Each structure stands twice: as C-alpha cells, then as structure tokens.
Image (cartoon, grey):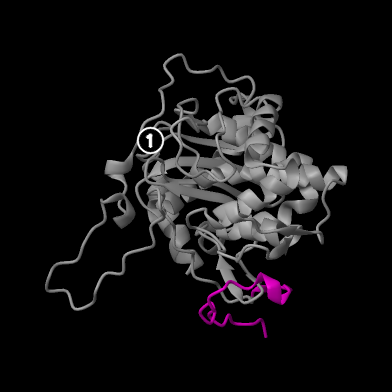
C-alpha cells in the first residue's frame, strides 16, 4: 500500500515543471532546521487556517507545561461552552475531566473543537483571553500576516494566516518543544471508550512521514502542514486549499518528495532563501473562499451517485455553523495507544463500540 501511494506521489511530482507545483492553493516547502525555503507558491496570500489553528493551541499548551502552569497528568474540566462546540469533537458531558495528555491527543489526533476550548480555559481562563495570547505569540514568532479569532479554527471571516506564517509556527513547534514531538505522529488513540483516529493520510502512505496537522472547513478547502524525515533530514510542507482530502495527500507527498530531491543541489548553489529573508510578495491576495471548488457534501459540492446506484451515499456529519468534519484515516496494522480515563469522562449517551485494531505480533 505504501509503495503504491508513493508511486502516485511520484507521478504527481512529474507535474512540477519549472518549479510550478500541481494546481491548488498556496504551498511552501522548507527545512525546519534552518528555515530554508525549497519551494514557495503564493506563500503570502491570506487563507483560512481551519484546524491548523490548533497547532498554535498546542504550542501554547506546551508553553504552559514548560512554565509549570500545567502538568501532563493534571485533570481539567469539560465546560458547557466546550460542549456547545460543533464537530469534530469528543462530546463529553459537562463536569467530565481530561488530563492535559489526553487533551493534547484529542486536539492533535481527532482535531477536537471542544477540547481546544477546554485547553484555552485551562491556560487563560477564557477563550477570549487565550486568543489574545495566540495573537501575541504569533507576533513574537514573526507571523505578521496572521490573525486568530478562536482556538480551534472554526469558520470566522477574520481568522486568516498564510503558508509562510504556518511554516514559521510549525518550525517553532519542533524547535522549541522537541520533547512533545511524538504527539504529532500519533495515528490513533483511546480516551476511555472513545476511539479517535487521525485525518492525516500521509502517516500511512508516505515514506518517512512523521506528523503534523490537517485542517478543513468549506471556505478553506483541505489544508495540511506535513512533515517527513529521511536519513536524518526533516522536510516540512504547507498545502492549502485542496478540493479533497485525497488531493491534499497527493500534493503534500509530491511537494515533500520535491523537497528531498532538490535539497542537495539547492544547498550546493545556495539557491534558497529562508522563511525570514524571502521577500513578502507585493501582489499577495486577500482571503478568498474555495467552497465552490471543494468536493464535499457538507459544502454542497459533493459528487452524488446516480439514482440507479445500489448503495446509499452516506452523508458526513455537519456542524451547526457549516464547518466541515473530516473522516479519520483508517488505522494501519500497529495497535492503538490506550489512555486511561475515569468513569466521569464518559458521554451521557453510550458511545458505539470502537473498531478493534490489530496488535503487533
């Protein structure tokens, strides 16, 4: 399976002619060790980050752990406000508690909107105060074209970022908090009886893939910050605005492969600029919606089967405000990471029995 997808990525790579990537939104490929840019396309155009916002939420959680404000085994309450967030979510009952470790797994693996609120309240007292902290940190990290409005990336017209700014954030995560890097590569986990799975298809299909985060709302399309390491060298890619999750995976794979293949000659000829030195585009575009190009039932643009089709098309869940909810990627052979949870964490309604994951013999 991995080899087949790798071949698909290489086929897509052939569309990179004269360093023009396959069609899509903004994109950027870089080396996080020194910020060297290996490929950039519309890197300063404004874009809705969707759940890539949660990278900043995780960054500030790591910061709170470093300063001692939080501890990984500390339990934090699940609030009424968190319960009111639309999917993707854990959907616990008010008064339940989660450890910070569990919360980070739910935030990064499942992209749980409600848990982003739980963490914001635990760190800053309220989502509004937390957002102020997010924007202050963005300025410190040099994310000059980013504005956060909420901790989870749910639709908000004013919540914008750029591929370059997201690259700066991703680089800061691996540079400042390497001790928590394993959270970004987890494929699935259990929180009590709740089984959660990643939306990052690269973890199953691309050689050397080792994490980061996906994001999706109708107006942004399918986004991802992706990381892969081969022979000790890490390359990261930012891909924004793809029409489907599959196209997002293929484009990110082709760009990562391009990064690995081009790194040597770019280093030899000192061909690359860095995230900090690359000039800001004078023709950078304002944020735009790609809803009409996205193929998703939630966005009203899904492909429907013909009336004669035998099987009924299953419509994915839709949030209250029209935010899209991604389907998790199916688990690979290795087993899940089990997370202990006390009975108070169970939802009011009994959750469905989770799928049994294979174990390593």
In the displayed structure, 349 sits above or below 262; it is: below
Q: Is 39 placed left or right of 336 in the picture?
A: left
Q: Residue furthest top?
A: 282
Q: Position of residue 65 (x, y in %)?
A: 82, 48
Q: Position of residue 308 (x, y in %)?
A: 12, 74
In-image side of 207 versus 181 (left or right): left
Q: Secondary structure at mark 1?
A: loop
State the quadrant of the C terminus: bottom right
Q: Main secondary structure of the magenta part?
A: loop
Q: Position of residue 230 (x, y in %)?
A: 65, 52
Residue furthest left as drawn: 308
Residue 319: which quarter of the image?
bottom left
- Residue 31 point in image, percent of width and height: 64, 37
- Residue under the point 65% across and 58% down: 185
Q: Is residue 237 above or below residue 250?
A: above
Q: Residues within 10 Å of mark 1 (few under 14, many from 20)?
A: few
Image point (54%, 60%), residue name? 89
Residue that numbered label 1 is attached to: 17
Residue 206 on the magenta span: no
Q: Is residue 360 magenta?
A: yes
Residue at the spot x=55%, y=42% of the render?
237
Magenta stretch bounds = 336-361
Asked if residue 60 can be seen in this view, the reply is yes
């Amino acid at each position: 399976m991995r080899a087949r997808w790798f071949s698909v990525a290489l086929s897509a790579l052939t569309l990179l002619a004269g360093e023009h990537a396959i069609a899509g939104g903004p994109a950027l490929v870089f080396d996080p060790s020194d910020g060297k840019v290996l490929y950039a396309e519309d890197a300063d155009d404004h874009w809705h980050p969707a759940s890539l916002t949660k990278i900043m939420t995780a960054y500030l959680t790591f910061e709170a752990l470093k300063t001692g404000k939080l501890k990984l085994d500390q339990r934090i309450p699940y609030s009424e406000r968190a319960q009111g967030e639309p999917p993707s979510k854990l959907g616990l009952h008010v008064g339940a508690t989660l450890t910070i470790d569990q919360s980070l797994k739910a935030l990064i693996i499942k992209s749980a909107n409600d848990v982003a609120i739980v963490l914001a309240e635990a760190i800053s007292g309220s989502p509004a105060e937390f957002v102020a902290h997010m924007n202050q940190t963005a300025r410190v990290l040099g994310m000059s074209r980013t504005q956060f409005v909420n901790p989870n990336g749910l639709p908000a017209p004013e919540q914008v970022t750029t591929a370059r700014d997201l690259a700066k954030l991703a680089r800061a995560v691996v540079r400042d908090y390497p001790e928590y890097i394993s959270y970004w590569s987890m494929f699935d986990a259990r929180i009590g009886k709740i089984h959660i799975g990643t939306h990052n298809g690269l973890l199953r299909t691309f050689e050397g893939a080792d994490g980061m985060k996906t994001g999706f709302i109708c107006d942004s399309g399918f986004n991802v910050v992706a990381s892969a390491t081969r022979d000790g060298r890490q390359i990261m890619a930012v891909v924004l605005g793809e029409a489907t999750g599959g196209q997002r995976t293929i484009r990110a794979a082709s760009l990562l492969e391009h990064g690995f293949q081009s790194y040597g000659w770019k280093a030899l000829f000192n061909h690359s600029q860095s995230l900090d030195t690359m000039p800001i585009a004078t023709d950078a575009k304002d944020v735009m919606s790609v809803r009409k190009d996205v193929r998703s039932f939630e966005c009203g643009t899904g492909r429907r089967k013909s009336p004669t089709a035998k099987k009924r098309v299953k419509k994915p869940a839709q949030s209250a405000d029209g935010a899209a909810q991604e389907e998790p990627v199916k688990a690979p052979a290795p087993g899940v990471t089990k997370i202990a949870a006390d009975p108070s964490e169970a939802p009011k309604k009994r959750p469905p029995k989770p799928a049994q994951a294979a174990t390593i013999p």
